[in-house]
Image: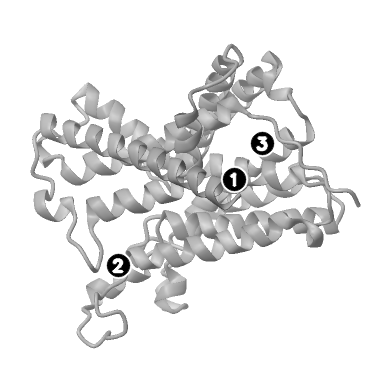
Amino acid sequence: MVRSEKKHRIIFIDLIRALAVIQMVQGHTIDALLAPEYRSLDYPAYYIWNFMRGITAPVFMFSAGTVFTYLFRLVNEPFENNPRVKKGLKRFLLLVAIGYLLRYPTYTIFDFSNISQERLDIFFSVDVLQLIGFRLLFLLISAFIAEKIKLSDTIVFLFISMFFFISSPFITKINWIDYLPQPVAGYFYTGTGSLFPLFPWAGYVVFGGLLGSYLARNPLIFKSNKFSFNLLIYGVAFIIISKAITLISNKVFNYYYVDSSYNLDTIFFRLGFVLVLNSIVSFISQKIESIPKIIITVGRNTLIIYVVHLIILYGSAWNPGLSVIFASKLDVAPTIFIAISMITLMVLMVYVFNKLKFRNKQLVT
């Protein structure tokens, strides 16, 4: 079969990816450094920041699923012959390995004799990199299932993402450490200190795969107003569903949800907001023929940005981080200054990295 991989520059995806990674950097920085007395939802600025911080991870994961599936489905070959399968598996292993390396509990590498239980708990906890790594694996598995049982990606991806979303409130209430080893239990709930267990976070990546597959099957559809409008309709529908879940729980079952990433109303609201955000950005991008290359570069280098800014901010087994030095003690002004400086540093880093990589290619050729 002839290989076909004609890519179109989808500007709104570039913008969403860059926005997500910048939001992530400033969110981590402010959260690590800002003093507790300024963390009040009564302050409008903090309320907005806190809301957007809750949306950052879903946007980041949704866009990761969209981009991977878009590139995967552009290759018109059977699953076993698709070169994106091998790339995806390598990416899965790399992300999981780096995720654990960032939380490595000892600078001595092989000597675990003096490691406290607290350090081990941190090492075995599941964070964004392990999450996205396994999400890519789930996308590959989903694509394989869709191809072998001859169903469309839409049905398979929708079913799998909804499984992660709908079962999340029940799965996360099980004390998995009673049934599974700690390194495995951390993938199912937050009880062992994991920040991003599979439920519900895997759902955002797989649901992003829906959009990626649709874009690959419909070249240039993203340039139409109808595409942006449809994203808006789906986004608003999920937001309405989330509000309906809250209302029914309150009025019918007399159960009041506490705002949590693992409750169905919050999950559907965030998913709806992600779709609305994509709709707005896609509509704006239709008026734009091109964007600065640095925005594309930032979006393409999310991994190195994520790793480096975490090492600077939180440290590692081999170096202290800013959070160790300042530890939520700073006023608003210095916190914002450091956040802006961190973003600037990350942008400069990927700019220089990209220049060196390009120059290296020229020397080789």
Q: Provide the residue designation for mark 2.
A: 122
Q: Residue type at mark 3?
A: Leu
Q: Residues within 10 Å of mark 1 (few under 14, many from 20)?
A: many
Describe the element under mark 2 as helix, strand or loop. helix
The correct choice, above or below, for 20 with respect to 110 in the image is above
Residue that appears at 43% across and 54% down: 128
SS type, badge 3: helix
Measured as percent of width and height from the top left, residue 292 is found at 48, 24
Numbered label attached to residue 211: 3
Q: Are marks 2 and 3 in contact (CB under 8 Å)?
A: no
How far across and how far down the image is residue 35, in percent?
11, 40
> Callout 2: few (<14), some (14-19), or many (20+) C-alpha neighbours within 10 Å?
some
| Residue 230 visible, this orientation | yes
Could you tell me residue 122's position as x and y percent? 30, 67
Distance Cα–Cα, label 2 vs label 3: 34 Å
* Occupied quadrant, residue 204: top right
Q: Nearer the viewer, residue 222 or 252?
A: 222
Compared with 162, 122 (above or below) is: below
The residue positioned 48% from the left and 60% from the top of the image is 95
The amino acid marked with disc number 2 is: Ile
Q: Amino acid at mark 1?
A: Gly
SS at circle 1:
helix
Contact? badges 1 and 3 (CB < 8 Å): yes
* Mark number displayed over residue 65: 1
* Front one among 27 and 346: 346
On the question of residue 248 being in view, the answer is: no
Distance between the Cα atoms at labels 1 and 3?
Answer: 8 Å
